[in-house]
Amino acid sequence: MRRLNQGKFDVKTFTVKLDTDKTAQLLIEAVAAYPMGLVAHINGQANCAKRGIQVPADQILEIFRPDLAVRVWAAEKSAGIDIPLRIHLYQKDGKTVVTYRTAREVFAPYVNPELERIADELDGIFDQLLAILEPHCAQEAA
């Protein structure tokens, strides 16, 4: 069994002034336009509501592309467990919080130079996808 490095995660987090559904929709449109692939849209709030459970907004967008998956598998088959990459959207204090664990962080435990190159490419793509939200970012208190 291979032991992976442990440590604090490199996660990009920011708050937007839009509701969670609108934020998700903007990101889904950006993913389609890039083009990347929306592998799954998990709406935790809607799924809980189907069971009569009320929770604040909580959604996950799983994003990837088949050609990138093939490259990840070729570099390190076991890294397949870590794709697709995810963007987490949730409601906190009446605002929408967006988080993304960077590809470099996701692939770091494998200590594989090819995965590092793929991660750099992916982080650039995700930076561009997330940039669609910049006009909607809430000002953080100093």
Image (cartoon, grey):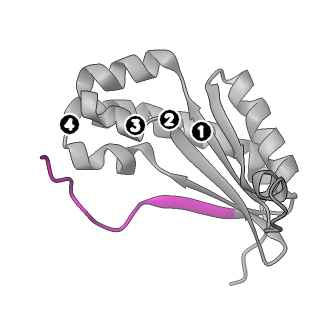
**Residue at the farthest bottom position:** 142
Residue occupying the point 50% across, 35% down: 84
Relative to 8, say whether 101 is above or below: above
Please give the label number shown on residue 120.
Answer: 3
Residue occupying the point 81% across, 49% down: 23
Mark 2, residue position: 84
Q: Residues within 10 Å of mark 4 (few under 14, many from 20)?
A: few
Along the polypeptide, which appears first: circle 3 or circle 1?
A: 1
Residue type for callout 2? Pro
**Which stretch is magenta?**
1-14
Along the polypeptide, which appears first: circle 4 or circle 2?
A: 2
Q: Nearer the viewer, residue 82 or 34?
A: 82
Residue type for callout 3? Asp
Q: Residues within 10 Å of mark 2 (few under 14, many from 20)?
A: some
76 sits to left or right of 46: left
- Contact check, label 1 and label 4, Cβ < 8 Å: no
Please give the label number shown on residue 115.
Answer: none
Q: Residues within 10 Å of mark 1 (few under 14, many from 20)?
A: some
Please give the label number shown on residue 62.
Answer: 1
SS under mark 4: loop
Q: Position of residue 28 (x, y in %)?
A: 75, 35
Along the polypeptide, which appears first: circle 1 or circle 4?
A: 1
- Contact check, label 3 and label 1, Cβ < 8 Å: no
106 sits to left or right of 113: right
- Contact check, label 3 and label 2, Cβ < 8 Å: no
Residue 96: image quadrant is bottom right
Q: Nearer the viewer, residue 95 or 121?
A: 95
Please give the label number shown on residue 112.
Answer: 4
Q: Is residue 69 within the magenta segment?
A: no
Q: Position of residue 107 (x, y in %)?
A: 32, 43
